[in-house]
């Protein structure tokens, strides 16, 4: 059978209706599962700052029907949803689902230099976005979770961009706390991350179905979280691939 073996096809950055994604976790699992190609996905909905203006505008525009961020009071329900769907994903598709969150800072008004979007993989407890990035990274370590610096440099594909370069700009102070850096996010490539030889990963930043076709990570590891975590941190036998319709189908 043609395929990605012995590599695992992975996407560690997926949003659902728990924040600003279009699909439920169940629909995401079925979308990835039905390709018959994916081995690992992480659900990483936004945790927002209390005063996130963009989310406030979004809530107004959608008359309060969309959440845009996971709240502290329902974070356990969110983790329960991921676990239940994860069990179904493994039974039905052999798809491993990892619980995560993207701790998201969207300062505007000139404070943009402080913005970081940080994914915590294998998160156990809510992490507030209303604290400096260094404290978010330390809390991720305390939870024995894994941190990903999301879109750490400018994205050329976004018409309106809130820059999220804080971790990159302060890499000499912060890189020892960052486990992995996104070298690719959806259609963007961040060649700067390779300059420093940082551990890299490629993710879709999935919000809607068409984002399935985007940069992804290939990892050579057993299909369980401890092995995948080690492979990401060691960053040996890791590759990025642009997942496209018809990828690796039999001729
Ligand atoms: Zn982000
Ligand atoms: Zn994201």
Image: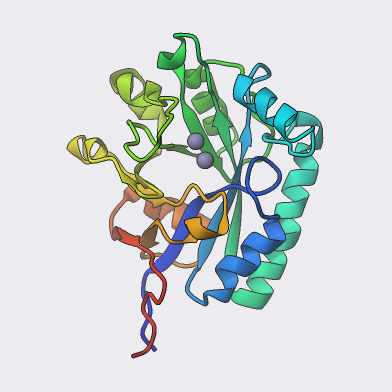
Using the image, determine if residue 5 lies above or below residue 191: below
Residue 44 location in percent, x, y?
59, 44
Q: Nearer the viewer, residue 158 or 88?
A: 158
The image quadrant where one finds the C terminus is: bottom left
Residue 1 location in percent, x, y?
39, 89
Q: Is residue 114 visible?
A: yes
Left-right relation of 220 to 224: left
Residue at horizontal 39 percent and vertical 83 percent from the top: 249
Q: Is residue 5 visible?
A: no
Q: Nearer the viewer, residue 240 or 55?
A: 55
Left-right relation of 19 to 148: right
Left-right relation of 99 to 219: right
Find the residue positioned furthest to the left.
195
Q: Determine the image quadrant of residue 41.
A: bottom right
Using the image, determine if residue 41 lies above or below residue 187: below
Residue 94 location in percent, x, y?
59, 74
Using the image, determine if residue 147 lies above or below residue 238: above
Residue at horizontal 79 percent and vertical 39 percent from the top: 65
Q: Determine the image quadrant of residue 124.
A: top right
Q: Nearer the viewer, residue 74 or 238?
A: 74
Residue at horizontal 44 percent and vertical 9 percent from the top: 110
Residue 123 location in percent, x, y?
62, 41
């Amino acid at each position: 059978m043609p395929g990605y073996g012995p590599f695992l096809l992975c996407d560690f950055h997926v949003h659902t209706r728990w924040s600003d994604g279009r699909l439920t976790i169940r629909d995401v699992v079925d979308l990835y599962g039905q390709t018959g190609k994916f081995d690992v996905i992480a659900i990483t909905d936004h945790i927002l700052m209390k005063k996130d203006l963009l989310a406030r505008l979004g809530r107004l525009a959608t008359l309060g029907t969309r959440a845009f961020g996971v709240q502290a009071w329902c974070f356990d329900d969110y983790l329960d949803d991921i676990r239940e769907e994860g069990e179904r994903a493994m039974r039905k598709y052999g798809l491993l689902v990892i619980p995560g969150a993207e701790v998201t800072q969207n300062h505007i008004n000139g404070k943009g230099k402080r913005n970081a979007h940080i994914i915590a993989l294998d998160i156990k407890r809510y992490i507030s976005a209303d604290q400096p990035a260094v404290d978010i990274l330390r809390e991720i370590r305390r939870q024995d979770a894994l941190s990903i610096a999301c879109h750490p440099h400018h994205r050329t594909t976004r018409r309106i961009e809130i820059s999220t370069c804080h971790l990159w700009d302060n890499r000499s102070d912060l890189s020892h706390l960052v486990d992995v850096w996104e070298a690719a996010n959806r259609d963007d490539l961040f060649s700067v991350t390779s300059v420093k030889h940082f551990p890299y990963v490629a993710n879709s930043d999935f919000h809607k179905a068409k984002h399935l076709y985007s940069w992804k990570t290939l990892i050579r590891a057993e299909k369980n979280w401890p092995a995948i975590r080690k492979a990401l941190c060691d960053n040996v036998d890791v590759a990025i691939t642009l997942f496209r319709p018809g990828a690796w189908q039999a001729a």
